[in-house]
């Protein structure tokens, strides 16, 4: 006879009145915050149905955006997914630039692509560190480069409407090239045997739930905005998305490893083609987007990060709606978890990359 239990995931899960807490360890990014899973289980604790219960870390970002001007919005836009900070800033900046018809200098376009790939490398290294501790060395290396360029370690606040806040420091591109030459995901020793066959997300289910990013591509969803809806610099890069079809925990981790190599290659191409010139444009004292709406999206580390901006011609947004990858992806646990043993949940969820702040935006 089946019964219902509720399990909690994350650092604050023990305070949510759950039957069991799933411990992903202090280093796993999905453990920062908390969400619940309502599970239907058999007597031997095999999951037959699962429902994610979210909203415990509600941040109210979309309402905060409405009372801040467009410059101030950028300082908040990187906080809901703290591992995709640069990419999230970029999505908002693109929305305002398209609404105003602003031309961004070429050097800024290429630096944005380069910094997106470094941001992606950093995020993937953080997710890989609990499975492979030596990934932490690379994470520290790329985070130091992002900090040197932007001045921020977590919240970079480096994008500006019309480009970047300032140019990168002298010698920085050389240090990026030196770092990239040291990154080798082949050195990562991961026990794939314990991941294979667990938490399978089928292709049709991934499409139905709108799953994007490495999780979607691990299930055969051949979709990557860097290729399919590219920003200007990405149009000139050689991009072949990392794709697998198994859809299990092992495939998701293998996709992350493949993405590390892809981001490394793309960052090198950016360095080779980086032009000289300005990195921003002179802005008026107050930026006002014309009346209307626009939707922009970028390929963030965890998938599609979209911004729907509606304006009434004022210096603050009328509405600014976020389409975050973690919010869509976490819903897929309803399709992924049935058939999984409760004791296998830590292994399955450790391969399933989400950020709770990105869910509870």
Image: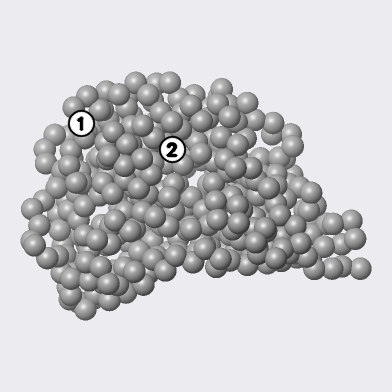
State the colouring used for the structure image: one colour
60 with respect to 219 (left or right): left
Position of the C terminus by quadrant: bottom left
Could you tell me if the residues under marks 2 and 1 are in contact, i.e. CB atoms within 8 Å?
no
The image position of residue 53, as x and y in percent, is 63, 67
The image position of residue 150, as x and y in percent, is 27, 40
Position of the N terminus by quadrant: bottom right
Residue at left offset 75%, top offset 57%: 20
Which residue position is annotated with label 2? 122
- Quarter location, residue 234: top left
Residue at left offset 56%, top offset 37%: 128
Q: If you read the primary sequence from the N terminus, does the residue marked by circle 2 or circle 1 appear first?
A: 2
In space, the residues marked 2 and 1 are separated at their CA atoms by 20 Å
Assign a secondary structure to mark 1: loop
Residue at left offset 21%, top offset 60%: 71
- Quarter location, residue 270: top left
The image position of residue 37, as x and y in percent, is 68, 63
Give the label on residue 92, or none.
Answer: none
- Which residue is more in the foreground, 246 or 256? 256
- Local packing at callout 2 (Cα closer than 10 Å; few below 14, some 14-19, many 20+) is many
Which residue position is annotated with label 1? 169
183 with respect to 233 (left or right): right
The image position of residue 262, as x and y in percent, is 44, 35
42 with respect to 61 (left or right): right
Residue at left offset 71%, top offset 54%: 21
- Which residue is more in the foreground, 69 or 231? 69
């Amino acid at each position: 006879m089946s019964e219902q239990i509720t399990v909690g995931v994350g650092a604050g899960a023990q305070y949510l009145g759950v039957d069991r807490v799933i411990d992903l360890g202090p280093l796993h990014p999905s453990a920062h915050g908390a969400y619940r899973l309502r599970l239907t289980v058999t007597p031997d604790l095999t999951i037959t149905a699962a429902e994610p219960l979210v909203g415990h870390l509600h941040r109210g970002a979309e309402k905060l955006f409405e009372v801040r001007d467009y410059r101030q919005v950028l300082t908040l836009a990187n906080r809901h997914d703290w591992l995709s900070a640069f990419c999230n800033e970029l999505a908002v900046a693109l929305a305002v630039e398209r609404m105003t018809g602003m031309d961004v200098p070429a050097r800024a376009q290429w630096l944005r692509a380069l910094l997106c790939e470094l941001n992606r490398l950093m995020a993937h290294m953080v997710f890989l560190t609990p499975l492979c501790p030596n990934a932490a060395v690379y994470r520290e290396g790329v985070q130091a480069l992002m900090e040197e360029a932007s001045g921020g370690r977590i919240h970079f606040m480096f994008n500006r409407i019309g480009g970047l806040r300032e140019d990168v420091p002298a010698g920085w591109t050389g240090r990026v090239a030196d770092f990239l030459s040291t990154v080798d995901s082949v050195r990562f020793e991961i026990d794939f045997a314990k991941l294979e066959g667990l938490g399978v997300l089928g292709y049709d289910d991934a499409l139905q739930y709108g799953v994007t990013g490495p999780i979607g591509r691990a299930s055969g969803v051949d979709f990557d905005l860097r290729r399919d809806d590219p920003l200007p610099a990405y149009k000139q890069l050689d991009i072949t998305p990392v794709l697998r079809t198994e859809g299990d925990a092992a495939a998701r981790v293998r996709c992350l490893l493949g993405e590390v190599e892809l981001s490394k290659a793309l960052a090198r191409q950016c360095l080779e083609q980086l032009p000289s010139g300005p990195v921003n444009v002179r802005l008026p004292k107050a930026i006002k987007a014309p009346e209307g709406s626009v939707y922009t999206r970028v390929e963030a580390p965890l998938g599609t990060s979209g911004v729907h901006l509606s304006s009434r011609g004022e210096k603050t947004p009328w509405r600014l709606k976020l389409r975050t990858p973690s919010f869509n992806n976490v819903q897929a646990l309803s399709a992924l978890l049935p058939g999984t043993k409760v004791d296998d949940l830590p292994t399955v969820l450790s391969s399933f990359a989400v950020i709770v702040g990105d869910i509870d935006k």
